[in-house]
Amino acid sequence: MKSLIVVMLIGVLCALAGAGLFMLRKSDDSEDRRSSRMAKALAVRVGLSVALFAFILLSWLMGWIKPGGLPVLP
């Protein structure tokens, strides 16, 4: 369970890094092609983030994961 969450977080970071590279790269590609690639990478990042949030919420509701916050002192 935790490994799937970590893999999805790494995927989100890779998509964000890819969008940053497309934004900063100076190449022979046209401006429209570069911006469309960046938009697609950001769309993938948003989709992965929403899917990860939904998966964590579903896992919590099904009892697969439990919150482990700080203990409350009396």
Image (cartoon, grey):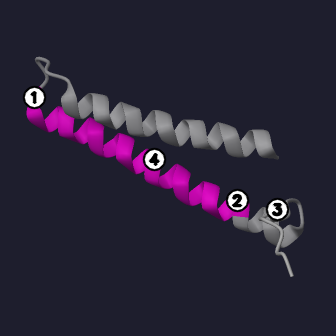
The Cα atoms of the two marked residues, 1 and 3, are separated by: 49 Å
The Cα atoms of the two marked residues, 2 and 3, are separated by: 17 Å
The residue at the far right in this view is 63
The Cα atoms of the two marked residues, 4 and 3, are separated by: 27 Å
Quarter of image, res 23: top left
Q: Residues within 10 Å of mark 4 (few under 14, many from 20)?
A: many
Residue bearing mark 3:
68
- SS assignment at label 2: helix
Q: Residues within 10 Å of mark 2 (few under 14, many from 20)?
A: some
Q: Residues within 10 Å of mark 3 (few under 14, many from 20)?
A: few
- SS assignment at label 4: helix
Closer to the N terminus: mark 1 or mark 3? Answer: 1
Main SS, magenta region, reads helix
The Cα atoms of the two marked residues, 2 and 1, are separated by: 38 Å
Quarter of image, res 58: bottom right
Closer to the N terminus: mark 4 or mark 2? Answer: 4
- SS assignment at label 1: loop
Q: Is residue 55 left or right of residue 51?
A: right
Residue bearing mark 4:
45
**Which segment is the magenta one?**
30-56
- Is residue 64 on the magenta stretch? no
Residue bearing mark 1:
30
Q: Is residue 7 left or right of residue 37?
A: right
- SS assignment at label 3: loop
Amino acid at the residue labelled 4: Arg
Mark linked to residue 48: none
The Cα atoms of the two marked residues, 1 and 4, are separated by: 23 Å
Residue bearing mark 2:
55
